[in-house]
Image: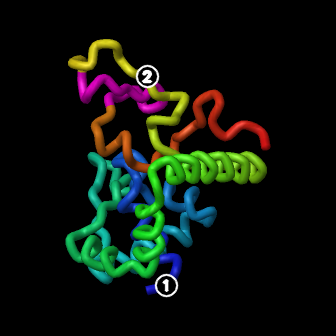
Amino acid sequence: MTANQWTALRYFAEANRFSRTVSAFAAYNVTTRGAASQTVKALESKGYLVRIRFGRDARSARIDLSQAGWAKLAQDPAVALTEALTNLPETLRGQMDRAVERVTCWVAAARRQSAFGTCAACRYLQVSADAASRAGGHYCRALATWLDVEDMQGLCALYAPAPGIGGTP
């Protein structure tokens, strides 16, 4: 597997259902849609990714990991780094998360590109006072839809930092 293919597997494993598209992966990986499409096709041919079509438009599809893709991801060379970070004390992990988020936002802004992040820190998140409303009361104003727990935890291509996140250096 190439480094780019590993990046794609990680991305599609971490992205929320709205961001698991070739276009969103291209933006995340700072590449063209054509190059991203070729990476996805290579992983599909290996049986690691599956394409799920949206309605009648054959061009629109969500990309998911197959069972083989999840098994391959378990062999990811970056697992050791992930485990090491998991072993850090909670406060240090929180500080590191915030620092990485800020740096990511600054770099994206400098390149005039979108940052990627999670819904919990996004300006489009609306939390309903009525937690029984739907999906735990989390609503995305950018997508005009309710979010489930997996959506809230996954990377989002429409992420826009909430005030106070990713400010100027």
Q: Residue furthest bottom?
A: 1
- Within the image, what quadrant is residue 162 found in? top right
Amino acid, disc 1: Thr
What is the number of the mark on residue 2? Answer: 1
User: Which amino acid lies under the numbered mark 2 shown in the image of this protein?
Assistant: Gln
Q: Look at the image and give the residue range highlighted in magenta.
A: 134-146
- Residue 69 seen in this snapshot: yes
The image quadrant where one finds the N terminus is bottom left
Q: Is residue 37 visible?
A: no
Q: Which residue has dot 2 on it?
A: 126
42 vs 55: above or below: below
Circle nearer the viewer, 2 or 1:
2
- Number of residues whose C-alpha sits closer than 10 Å to that of mark 2, classed few (under 14), some (14–19) or many (20 or more): some
Q: Residue at x 72, y 48 (%)?
A: 106
Foreground of the two, 14 or 79: 79
Left or right of 147, for residue 85: right
Q: Is residue 144 magenta?
A: yes
Relative to 58, does residue 74 appear above or below in the rendering?
below
Q: Vertically, is 25 above or below 102?
A: below
* Residue drawn at (28%, 37%) of the image: 148
- Left or right of 166: which side holds 134? left
Residue 64's spot in the image, x, y percent?
30, 61
Q: Is residue 137 magenta?
A: yes
Identify the residue at horizontal 42%, vertical 63% (top origin).
87
Vertical placement of 65 versus 71: above or below? above
